[in-house]
Amino acid sequence: MIRIHNAALPASEFEDANLSGSRFIDVNLEEAVFSDVNLDNVLISDARAYHATFRKTSMESATFENIDMRSVALRHVDLDGASIRFASLVNLSIAECDLRGMSINGYLVTDLLKLVEMPHSNEEMEE
């Protein structure tokens, strides 16, 4: 397990690495790139990660706490069992993803999406 504490790693590149179980605490990861990286069971806490990119990365059971993830790019990532708390997710976009079991503040996202789709279905029926 790797422990990185109180470090500045802006624009760092992590490629084809096994960092499972690592701890990144009080780190600057802005514009960092994680590509083909295993981040299973990782803890990233008290971090700045805006404009970071995660691609082809496994983050199963990862924990993100008190993290600034503004404008983060997630492409082909596995977040099964991951937890994000006390984070800034400004400008985060989610598309073409399997959202089964995902919840926001205790509400299943799939249930919330059904509520949004209902008014559109009613409007189509009235036409």
Image (cartoon, grey):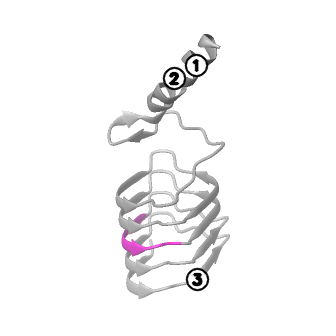
Badge 1: few (under 14), some or many (20 or more) residues near its Cα, within 10 Å? few
Q: Is residue 8 left or right of residue 37?
A: left
Q: Is residue 118 left or right of residue 48?
A: right
Badge 3: few (under 14), some or many (20 or more) residues near its Cα, within 10 Å? some
> Marks 3 and 1: which is nearer the front?
1
For the residues labelled 2 and 1, say whether their Cβ atoms are less than 8 Å apart: yes
Q: Residue at x 39, y 74 (%)?
A: 47
Q: Position of residue 69 (x, y in %)?
A: 46, 66
For the residues labelled 3 and 1, say whether their Cβ atoms are less than 8 Å apart: no
Magenta stretch prevailing secondary structure? strand
Image quadrant holding the N terminus, namely bottom left
Q: Quadrant of residue 15?
A: bottom right
In 3D space, how far apart are the residues under numbered discs 3 and 1 (Cα atoms)?
A: 49 Å
Task: Write down the region rendered in magenta.
Answer: 43-50
Q: Is residue 32 above or below residue 18?
A: below
Q: Which residue is mark 3?
A: 12
Q: Secondary structure at mark 3?
A: loop
Q: Is residue 7 above or below residue 91?
A: below
Q: Amino acid at mark 2?
A: Pro
Q: Residue at x 53, y 62 (%)?
A: 39
In 3D space, how far apart are the residues under numbered discs 2 and 1 (Cα atoms)?
A: 6 Å
Q: How many marks?
A: 3
Q: Which residue is mark 2?
A: 119
Q: Residue at x 52, y 60 (%)?
A: 91
Judging depth in this view, the residue of 90 and 24 nearest the camera is: 90
Judging depth in this view, the residue of 59 and 123 nearest the camera is: 123
Q: Residue 75: give its label.
A: none
Q: Position of residue 67 (x, y in %)?
A: 38, 67
Judging depth in this view, the residue of 79 and 110 nearest the camera is: 110
